[in-house]
Image (cartoon, coloured by chain):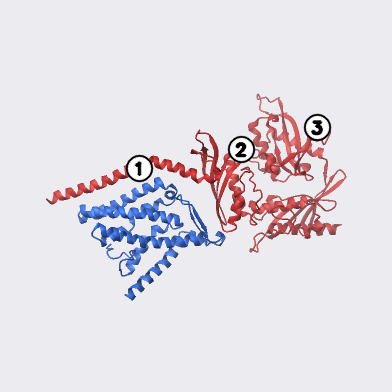
Chain colours: A red, B blue
Amino acid sequence: MKENKNLKDILYMVGFIVVFLGVIIGLNYALKSTKANNEAQYKVKKYETVLNGIKVGELKDVLKDTDDKIIKEKYEALNVNNKVVAILYEATKDNQYGSITIRVAIDAEGKIIGVEAEVDQSISPDKTKAYVEAYKGSKISSPKADGVSMPSVGISVGTANEIFSAIAESAGIVDDIFTQLFGEGYSFSEVTTITEDTETVKGVKDVLVNDEVKAQVYILEGKALYNTTEGYGSDEEKSIELQLIVEPISTRIIGYYFDMDKYHHTKSYITHVENYLNALIKNNVLAANYSDIEVDAETGGTSSTGSLQPANTVKLVRTLLNNLKNNLGYVFGEEETVNSDAVKTKQEITVGSDKFYLYYLEDEGIYETGNSEEKSIGLYIIINAENKVVSSYVPLDKYHHTKSNAFMKNVYNYINGIIKNKVDVTTISSFEVDSDSGATGSGNPSNSVKLLISMIKDLGTYVGGDE
Amino acid sequence: MDVKGLNIFNVFKKRTVTEKSMAILAITLLPALFVTNSLEATILYLIYFLVYLILVLLVQMLIKKVFPKEMAIYASVIGSVGVAIIVSQFIDAFHIGFANNYLLYIYLFAINLIPIMVKEDNDDLGKSLVDGIQSFLGFAVIVIIVALIREVLGTGSIVFGNYTNVKFSLKLFESSKALLIFNNAFSNFIILGIVLAIVQLVLNRKEEVK
């Protein structure tokens, strides 16, 4: 009797388990299509705000391992005809104030259809959100917030911009070098010749933004052997055209552009040339004072060992740069050691009948409010005979303050401001530059900008005394 | 562990507050507290918990009738886990956003002590269901208080619409003035400690008056 009861209980237990398993498995099948449908709707709903009224039928997951890790989701939004109507992204990045999550929809050209920001920041979250969401309508690679002022603390916006930059890279939306350097509103002047030697220096054109000359583009062309390996066209010369972008007056190389239709050397080796030119940019080389520096063709690193063999195209670029230097006709005097406060060296530059002076300034200053530790910044500055700033740049290897985008932006804006306003270094004490726009005003400069002002004041004192 | 007479969630019933009953109250609340970072999520959690509670009480009564005492305990465990999985399947299908964030805490319904305490205290289904719903109300009040404190102090506003179609937003103060500590899960324990101290004080005073 007892055995029968035990067997009955065991059978009940087995039946109980089987019923539960049956219900669970049955529900799993029954709810499968509902779940899939709701999941699709949930994803679409999540991006509803940024899709700006565009009707979407399905989202196709296209996130790749090669995408930046801050990108959490990437979908192609397909309409009912299975046509891609937008690319959707969700990306999150942390900084010292918290985190920022951006959801954005872009079209095939990289135009921002809509953007939504979740700004979990301890400083100005609402202003940052308003600013970032005003990027709608601009290009993902160079987002702009028209009509909305930037929060006074720009770190959160800097983090958001890093997210947009990662998204632009993932979407393959890369601006040409001119847009990267000067924004979308640039134009070119007519090409003029600077020398009778138009064989290699074809001419120069100005880059204009609001009728202001922002840079000059030297068009260089040359012909050379493109492959010295025997049996591979070793006796054949082919040409390339290089457009070298330099700052006015200082001729500091800030960029380059190759028209690939006029680049007849082996295109797969262009990385060597790019590495070489990038090293010139990184080292703040002045085109008018160009001298060969050795650059590792693979890494772009410089070397003083003399053991590096430049690629054929790099050799040609060196020749072109030497020709340009000779045609520019700048005469650089000997570099004098000054060591008067922040003023370290001085070098005279003669261009025709005009004289300029290139100074290197370096000093230490507080880099973080509330921390008494001081760190140094180096600054090159070119002034004319009237002591007015005509060019200035910061060598990054001599810049030891915080290098994040938000702080560097203040420094670049200040430098652009003093060049734009042709500031007289002897009267720098009364000069203030808005950290955002670069315009003169009554802004409260950051620690790095305060140090720059102090260094330029030292230069003003030196120049005043020198006279 | 014998939990008979230790259910102090049901404020409609006279109960002596002991260290053991307070400990059980705290343990029972623990998984639910991790859902309290938004009031909307908390309400959704509580609705599903009520469904789970009713279903599991029905299953417990069935087990009581069908299985001998020595097997009932195993059947109870299987029943609780099974019902928790069934409820989680519905959430996973119908509330995708909520499931993405909180499905783990739905599975943890299976270790909630309310159904066990209710079953121990009641013999028939009707009484069990009444006791269960009354206990649920006590449970819900505490969890909602914690959620309200966390969302209001942690964000400065109350927002609905993240997990349901109910769109509602009430801004109480600037988010820059919010106390970010309340967005962290460990703030649960601080708030729970304060809430439980108040609960104990109120219940003790109630007893003293009697």
Lower position in the chain sequence, tag 3 or tag 2: 2
> Residue at horizontal 38%, vertical 54%?
B47
Query: Residue A462 at x, y = what percent?
Result: 81, 58
Q: Quadrant of residue A178?
A: top right
Give yes or no for contact between labels 3 and 1 (Cβ–Cβ under 8 Å). Answer: no
Q: Position of residue A166 (x, y in %)?
A: 58, 44
In screen coordinates, is A56 left or right of A290?
A: left
Residue type at numbered disc 3:
Thr
Callout 3 and callout 1 share a chain? yes
Cα–Cα gap, marks 2 and 1? 42 Å
Q: Secondary structure at mark 3?
A: loop
Residue A307 visible to an observer of this rendering: no
Outermost residue on the bottom side: it is B209
| Disc number placed over residue A28 in the picture, else none | 1
- Disc 2 packing (10 Å; few <14; some 14–19; many ≥20): few
Q: Which residue carries the number 3 mark? A: A198
- B120, above or below B97, in the image: below
Tell me the residue at 26%/54% (across/down).
Answer: B60
Tell me the tag on residue B58.
none
Q: Dot 3, crowdedness within 10 Å: few (<14), some or many (≥20)?
A: few
Kindly report which numbered mark, 3 or 1, lies closer to the viewer in this rendering: 1
